[in-house]
Image: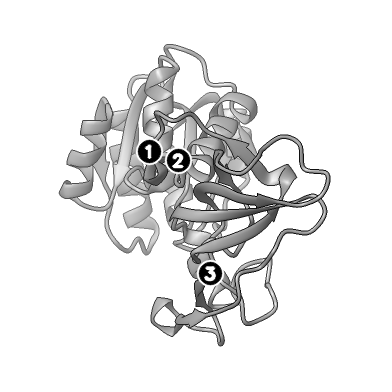
């Protein structure tokens, strides 16, 4: 088998394509011939030693995959060789083969393409959990999505529309705004690539308020963080819910008096 191995901390160019012996499944394990692997933001953090989970090196990154079961170990009963599946190994998906516990393997229908299946759970699973279980988004509410052109953000746009919400997509360029509109966003806001200073934060907040008028955003899906979080929460509706999803722009320093003024919730996802 071949695998893209992380042998030292670094970016994607630090990965090394390596020939390895194909592993065999042990008791309770499944060997999958990988047909496609999802690429997600945590993968880029993990190979730079910036993620909360640090697999021992050398390791292949890749937290989700789709493929065909090639062999099963003793005691495996839910899947068998030839089954089309997705799996969530945490790491190890950037390889031609992966051995994973049966518990993280999910069968998929023949009609589901491997490339779509490999990108399904981290994005749509995260966003479905966030919107339905954590925010309890209701039809007719306004949903503001920060980072709406990214993986989880794009999923949030689509799921928000499917749940009957009015969706405002916040992105960093017109190209991304056009993409968000194709996904179904009702309105878009283009924010600057860097947001520094009180004046800039309040100016962006005014744009969010205008887009989420008249009452503000009932739910804010924040996959960006940094100062963008404060700009967004200043546009939240009374008893709104701010979903904390990610921080590529940095961990926010949120003035907690804003939660008191709007009687709103800050909810971890």
Name the residue carrying label 3: 45
Mark 3 or mark 1: name the one nearer the start of the chain.
3
Residue 259, percent from left and from top: 60, 37
| 68 left or right of 201 in image | right
Name the disc covering residue 113, or none.
Answer: 1
| 170 left or right of 44 in image | left
Instruction: Report how far apart the C-alphas of labels 3 and 1 lie in the structure.
Output: 27 Å
Label 2 crowd bin: few (<14), some (14–19), many (20+), radius 10 Å: many
Name the disc covering residue 156, or none.
Answer: none
Task: Evaluate if marks 2 and 1 touch, with contact meaning CB atoms under 8 Å apart.
Answer: yes
Secondary structure under tag 3 reads: helix
Tell us which disc is closer to us: 3 or 2: 2
Tell us which disc is closer to us: 3 or 1: 1
Secondary structure under tag 1 reads: loop
At 44% from the left and 79% from the top, the residue drawn is: 11
Residue 175, percent from left and from top: 16, 48
Q: Tell me, yes or no, if residue 4 can be seen here.
A: yes
Instruction: Report how far apart the C-alphas of labels 3 and 2 lie in the structure.
Output: 22 Å
Residue 88, percent from left and from top: 61, 50
Name the disc covering residue 117, or none.
Answer: 2
Tell us which disc is closer to us: 2 or 1: 1
As drawn, 241 above or below 68? above
Residue 169, percent from left and from top: 32, 36
At 58% from the left and 24% from the top, the residue drawn is: 132
At 55% from the left and 42% from the top, the residue drawn is: 82
Question: What quarter of the picture does the C terminus occupy?
Answer: top right
Secondary structure under tag 2 reads: helix
At 38% from the left and 38% from the top, the residue drawn is: 113
As drawn, 85 above or below 239? below
* Closest to the observer, 209 or 223: 223
């Amino acid at each position: 088998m071949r695998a893209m191995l992380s042998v030292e901390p670094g970016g994607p160019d630090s990965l090394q394509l390596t020939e390895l012996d194909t592993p065999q499944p042990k008791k309770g394990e499944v060997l999958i011939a990988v047909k496609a692997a999802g690429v997600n933001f945590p993968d880029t953090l993990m190979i730079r030693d910036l993620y909360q989970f640090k697999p021992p090196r050398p390791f292949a990154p890749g937290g989700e995959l789709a493929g065909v079961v090639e062999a099963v170990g003793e005691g495996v009963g839910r899947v068998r060789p030839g089954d089309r599946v997705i799996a969530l190994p945490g790491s190890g998906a950037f390889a031609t083969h992966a051995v994973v516990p049966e518990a993280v393997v999910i069968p998929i229908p023949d009609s589901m393409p491997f490339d779509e299946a490999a990108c399904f759970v981290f994005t749509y699973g995260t966003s479905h959990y966030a919107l339905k279980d954590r925010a309890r988004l209701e039809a007719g509410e306004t949903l503001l999505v920060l980072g709406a052109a990214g993986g989880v953000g794009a999923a949030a746009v689509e799921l928000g529309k499917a749940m009957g919400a009015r969706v405002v997509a916040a992105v960093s360029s017109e190209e991304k705004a056009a993409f968000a509109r194709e996904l179904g966003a009702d309105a878009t806001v283009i924010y600057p690539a860097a947001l520094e200073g009180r004046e800039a934060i309040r100016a962006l907040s005014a744009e969010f308020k205008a887009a989420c008028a008249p009452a503000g955003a009932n739910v804010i899906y924040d996959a960006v963080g940094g100062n963008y979080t404060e700009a967004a929460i200043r546009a939240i509706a009374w008893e709104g819910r701010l979903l904390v999803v990610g921080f590529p722009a940095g961990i926010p320093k949120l003035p907690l008096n804003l939660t008191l003024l709007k009687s709103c919730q800050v909810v971890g996802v």
